[in-house]
Amino acid sequence: MFDERGRSREEVLEELERLLEADSTYSSGHPVASMSTIPHSLGVDVFARTLEKNAGRLHTFQGSARVEQEVLRMIADLLNLKGEPHGTTTSGGTESNILAVLAFRERAKRKTRSPEIIAPKTAHSSIDKAGWLLGVKVLRTRVDKQYRAVPAAIEKKINDNTIGVVVTAGTTYLGQIDPISEIAEIAQDHKIPLHVDAAFGGFVIPFLNEIGRGGQRFAFEVNGVTSVSTDPHKMGLAPIPAGTIIFRDPRYVKAITRTVPYLRGESSVQVSILGTRPAAPILATWAIMKHLGREGYRTVVESCMKHTDHIMERLHQNPMLHAAIEPVMNIVGIESREVPLDTIIRRMEQKGWRMAASPLPPTLRIVVMPHVTMGAINAFFNDLDEISMTIPP
Ligand code: PLP
């Protein structure tokens, strides 16, 4: 009910605290399958100080507008773009993917009235959402035994209605990287744009390269890549909602820019889907990136990979469980030999763990974010070992 008379701040806060007891907290280490984490404390400070700023009104908030451009420049640099970035900050990977498909569609308006995009089965479900919203058919293609896109399967689906291809650098289910260079060559041969969804991998793969953990070419260093999306609110340690999409060619941004007649200056043209939107996460991203530098992120990735190695050691000690693939980054998909996954999930949830399951392949999913400590991993595996080795009657 919406009460007639207001209550004291203390009363309200107490009730809210009670209500929020049902939430998991990252500090407990429990959400082992979340792509968000505890935001960096500097980002939290900046966020709290800048709540009133509206990134949908950049004419009013011209300082924030400049900071947004600096964020895009730093991320473009991380993604090896030579020259000026063209793009926008967004609310996250979903909005970025929708904008990529929108840009494909607008640029291909004269080419077809029945637009289609091609994406491997492992591309994030927001691609289907984009297709549904934008009237674009999504053709899903098969993946190989390592759950990577099969370039030949993508090429086979290309036809006169194809307006673009979407691949992933750091898949949601297993953290796998599609063979982007090969697919980019195919896209170029057919003069089709290619979007790389690096929502998760964007803040991981460049540092895997640097710590000798076998990263690979995935972003603008690959000719034929048209756009790359990356989420600071995942491994960038920024507060939610912080996403980005960057295009190599300004014509793609122009194609998705709309005017808002009652606003002035920069505010009157908007690239993002949202109108009013918080500048705070953008400003927090700027501060965290400036503060950590590449060195800071490298240390974060190194630590997450050490924890991932520990998970693999624990898995090797359990004959009933195994990893679907050798982890490429800090995501592990676990298959069970005997006990059905549903049973494991139910029993782990009874013990207080918040679990996630992926459909392809059927796995328990662990995302080894910075809040997932060695202690949390050991506690999780103590429970998981017990459950997975007890075959139900
Ligand atoms: N792309 C990938 C690869 C993802 O893993 C996710 C989310 O997990 C998204 C896009 C969607 O991101 P968001 O939830 O920030 O919209």
Image (tube, grey):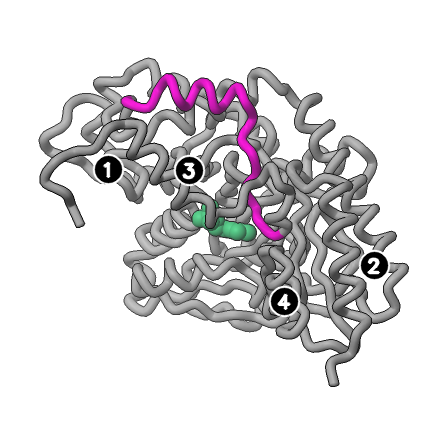
The front one of 72 and 360 is 360
N-terminal-most mark, 2 or 3: 3
Does residue 317 appear in the picture of this structure? Answer: yes
Is residue 40 found inside the magenta-colored segment of the image?
yes
Q: Position of residue 34 (x, y in %)?
A: 57, 49
Q: Is residue 107 above or below residue 303?
A: below
Q: Is residue 140 above or below residue 227?
A: below
Q: Amino acid at mark 4?
A: Ile
Q: Position of residue 105 (x, y in %)?
A: 34, 56
- Mark 3 surroundings within 10 Å by alpha-carbon count, few (fewer than 14), some (14 through 19), many (20 or more): many
Report which residue position mark 3 lands on: 241
Is residue 50 found inside the magenta-colored segment of the image?
yes
Report which residue position mark 4 lands on: 345
State yes or no: discs 2 and 3 in contact (Cβ < 8 Å). no
- Give the magenta part as a residue range: 33-52
Residue at the (22%, 19%) spot, across then down: 59
The front one of 302 and 120 is 302
Q: Amino acid at mark 3?
A: Pro
| SS assignment at label 4 | helix
What distance separates the C-alpha of mark 4 from that of mark 1? 40 Å
